[in-house]
Image: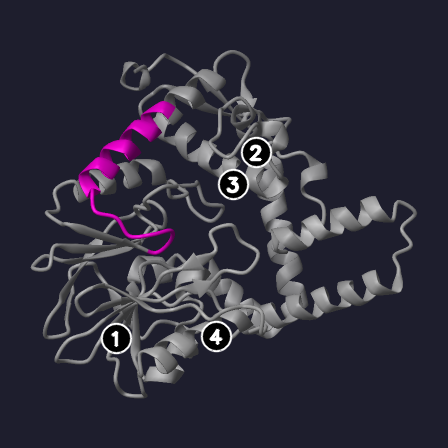
Amino acid sequence: MPESVKPESVQEVAPGIFQLRIPIPDNPLGHTLPYLITGPNKPVLVDTGLRSPEGIEALEDQLVGQLGIRPGQIDFILITHNHPDHYGLAIDAKKLTGARTAMHRIDWEQSPFRDAMNALKRDPGAARREGSDRMKDWYRRHGVPEEELQGELFSPRARRAAAEEEKRQHPEGIPSHGDSAEAGANDEREAQRWALFREMEPPDILLDGSEVYRTGTHDLRAFWTPGHTPGHLCFVDDAARIVFTGDHILPVITSNVSVRMTSDGDPLGDYLASVSKMDALDVDLVLPAHEHHFTDLKGRVAELHRHHDARLTAVLKAAEGTPRTAYEVAAGVPWDVGEWGEMDEFLRRAAVGETLSHLEHLSRRGSTRRIREADSRLVRWEATVWDARVRE
């Protein structure tokens, strides 16, 4: 970690529950928030963070340096879901503690990262190209313009922004020696991150969503909440009135719920049903994996339902008239992150995925219809009837 960066401090957010802060480089979220839950028995860790040079150093500093954890002192690492900013550092956490990792079986069996990891181990260059090509083809079918699919989709957004700035500074395409050196350093950092990603490994335990893990003070009950991913888990401490929500419920931003390239279904319907289940929990403290902890779970559940009702209304309105691709529908939807023309290509692709989840959910209600024309690779959608349930 650079000397100018101050190490993050562990925070005790409830008696015996310690919040870590693991950086997410080049991402506006900033951090993942794992939690160490202690007691007379061995502690349990919920989530780990993104695997990067900064993340590895932060995990060791906080888990070992600040909390004093040694090998053999943690029994289980419970993973809320399969995304790399939650599961990526599991291999390093295991090395530091000797703990076993546990994840919902659906999230492992349907993980797009599982096959990617195996392919990366065999041939990193080919795996990155093939994965990028498949994803680009999927986005093309849903109307994303070719100019927004140029380059490497998996590169950090900050690196792409730096490349655009370099183009503006050197319109003739002749960078200075300093720019070349910086580009080389970026390439080296990117290669290092991919090398770290290749070392991810399968979880030791596959969960069904009914298990309980006990520290002697806190009992953590697995609670299946599909939507953000098919096997997303929250963990509930009923006696302490605490819930660990992963990415399912966050205090300010809304969890990304997108149709996935590798699977069908109604992820938004799953998510809304899971959010409704959370309303039945009797808790005083919500510990999410990003942003900050908060207290009013029922109020946040109501906000999320209002948000998605409004988004369904906006998507349905944007789909009226001539059949449109998901990209065209997304361009007609108001987004919290800014106007469509001001959004970068990363945000637009995320918006396409979310728009697809809303279009698919509306189709289950009979309010939209998917159209596949024989002479076109494009998938288009149209509104069929106005749905009174999303009118308000």
Q: Label 1, label 3: how many angstroms apart (C-alpha)?
A: 33 Å
In this rendering, is residue 39 above or below 320?
below
Q: Residues within 10 Å of mark 1 (few under 14, many from 20)?
A: many
Q: Label 2, label 4: how many angstroms apart (C-alpha)?
A: 37 Å
Residue projecting furthest to the bottom: 71
Q: Determine if the magenta segment contains residue 308.
A: yes
- Name the front one of labels 2 and 3: 3
Q: Which residue is mark 2?
A: 142
Amino acid type indicated by mark 3: Ala
Residue 167 in view in this figure: yes
In this rendering, is residue 48 above or below 174?
below
Q: Earlier in the sequence, mark 4 or mark 1?
A: 4
Amino acid type indicated by mark 4: Ile
Q: Secondary structure at mark 3?
A: helix
Query: What is the magenta range?
Result: 289-310
Q: Label 2, label 3: how many angstroms apart (C-alpha)?
A: 12 Å
Identify the residue shown where x is 56% and y is 27%. Answer: 339
Q: Which residue is mark 1?
A: 76
Q: Which residue is mark 3?
A: 350
Task: Kindly identify which numbered label has been placed on residue 56.
Answer: 4
Amino acid type indicated by mark 1: Phe
Quadrant location of the N terminus? bottom right
Determine whether, in the image, residue 50 is placed left or right of residue 233. Answer: right
Q: Secondary structure at mark 1?
A: strand
Identify the residue shown where x is 54% and y is 18%. Answer: 323
Q: Label 3, label 4: how many angstroms apart (C-alpha)?
A: 27 Å
